[in-house]
Image: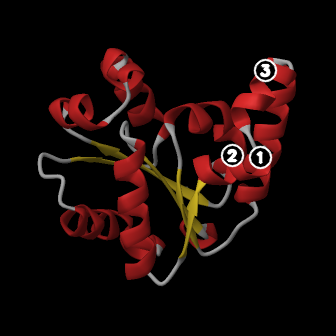
Amino acid sequence: MKKENINKIVLVSLCDNFSNQLATALSQTLDMVFCDTNALVEYELVDKNAMEKLCSPQYLKSCERKVLKHIASFENVVVSISYDYLIHNIDVLKHNSAVVFVELPKEFVKNNGDALAILAFEERTKNLKELADVNIAVRKTEIDFISRKIIENLGSVL
């Protein structure tokens, strides 16, 4: 992560709804734009479920990648992203970004995340720790508290 080139924050956790709430709050605090990757991909694909039925998995991945490349061109933005989109597109998103992984308590993910996130909790946590520029493990899930921790950790990059 080259400090002088950072123009976006890519935020990931194992609970997409929480990531969206946190990214929204962080973008408001930092006077940046908020981008929900999942919503943008679904919007671009119109009806993702219909697309999955009509198109090959390769075509769907290609369409998703095109959206992620578009997001990578954004500046002054806080991007909320799911685990799968980040893992499959890290090469595109890493450029000019600070990737922040918020490690939520396993019990919180169990109660608020999807089934796959809890089943693969340890593996996904390990992968995200290795990929992220900033790792923030939290016990409290208060949005304002975590926003401040992110800003502290990014420090002079912002």
Using residue 40 as the reference point, say whether residue 113 is left or right of it: left
Does 5 appear above or below 100? below
Q: Are marks 1 and 2 in contact (CB under 8 Å)?
A: yes
Q: Are marks 1 and 3 in contact (CB under 8 Å)?
A: no
What x and y, as percent, mark residue 110?
A: 23, 28
Q: Which residue lies furthest to the bottom in this view?
A: 31
Q: In the rendered structure, which disc, 3 or 2, sits on the residue that comes first in sequence?
A: 2
What x and y, as percent, mark residue 57?
A: 79, 19
**Disc sitting over residue 83 in the figure:** none
Instruction: Say which residue label 1 marks.
Output: 46
Tell me if residue 2 can be seen: no
Instruction: Give 84 or 149, whichever is nearer the viewer.
Output: 84
Mark 1 falls on what kind of element?
Answer: loop
Mark 3 falls on what kind of element?
Answer: helix
What x and y, as percent, mark residue 155?
A: 36, 72
Instruction: Say which residue label 3 marks.
Output: 53
Instruction: Give 96 or 46, whichever is nearer the viewer.
Output: 46
Please state which amino acid type lies under the numbered disc 2: Glu
Using residue 138 as the reference point, say whether residue 20 is left or right of it: right
Q: Do the residues labelled 3 and 2 touch (CB within 8 Å)?
A: no
Please tell me in which quadrant of the rendered image residue 104 appears. Answer: top left
Could you tell me which residue is drawn at 58 percent across and 39 percent down?
86
Please tell me in which quadrant of the rendered image residue 137 appears. Answer: top left
**Disc sitting over residue 42 in the figure:** 2
Could you tell me which residue is drawn at 85 percent across and 18 percent down?
56
| Label 2 packing within 10 angstroms: few (<14), some (14-19), many (20+) | some
| Label 1 packing within 10 angstroms: few (<14), some (14-19), many (20+) | few
Please state which amino acid type lies under the numbered disc 3: Lys
Does 124 appear above or below 139? above
What x and y, as percent, mark residue 68?
A: 73, 48
